[in-house]
Image: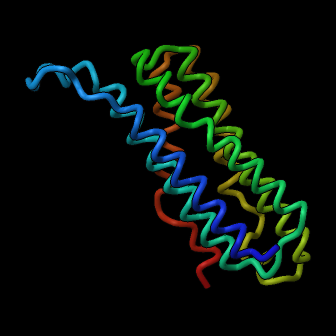
Amino acid sequence: MTKGRLEAFSDGVIAIIITIMVLELRPPHTDTIESLKPLWPVFLSYILSFINIGIYWNNHHHMFQATQKVSGRILWSNTHLLFWLSLIPFATAWMGENHFTTIPIALYGCVLLMCGLAYYILAQSLKHLHGKDAAFSKALGSDRKGKFSLLLYGVGIGLSFIHPLLGFSTYVLVTLIWLVPDKRFEN
């Protein structure tokens, strides 16, 4: 299988994930501004998740532009990432519908942690496939940003049990860290 086919499949799955998320946004049954107020947690959850999925799509694209080949291990690592990304709509909806309570915030963090871990595994699998001296591996480097993000997700999960908005704020921080596309692979 070519890397182009893997990218096309991934793009399709990510597009479906975003579509599922937007379908969870339900308009109010009245036409007043006040009727929108109860929906702010749902919309805020959607915004954060949409940005996160956009970040994964963007970095996945850049990473595979630097990739020369794929293998069965890469296909499974990529499928593993897509699995965890596909759980974001559920975690997003649950968190928003429950107005940022502890367990939904913690679950959302667990899903983000697993997405981050799956992305890290995919990157390491690609590094292994290409060899440590390949341009891909040199561009990936030690992946401190990826490791730090995993640590922050874990901290956020713990903080969500102290106060849910502390956990949520930690997830926002990780999103802000990754908002600028990963430049390592652009050259």
Query: Residue 65 vs residue 173: left or right?
Result: right
Report the number of discs. Answer: 0
78 w.r.t. 164: above or below: below
Residue 10, position as x, y percentages in the image = 64, 60
Q: Quarter holding the N terminus?
A: bottom right
Residue 18, position as x, y percentages in the image = 48, 47
Residue at (60, 31) in percent of width and height = 109
Closer-to-camera residue (2/162): 2
Residue 89, position as x, y percentages in the image = 52, 35
Question: Which colour style is shown?
Answer: rainbow
143 w.r.t. 176: above or below: below
Query: Residue 134 vs residue 113: left or right?
Result: right
160 w.r.t. 113: above or below: above
Residue at (51, 48) in percent of width and height = 52
Q: Quarter holding the C terminus?
A: bottom right
Residue at (61, 72) in percent of width and height = 62
Closer-to-camera residue (154/90): 90
Residue at (19, 25) in percent of width and height = 36
The image quadrant that residue 66 belongs to is bottom right
Residue 185, position as x, y percentages in the image = 64, 76
The residue at the far left in this view is: 32
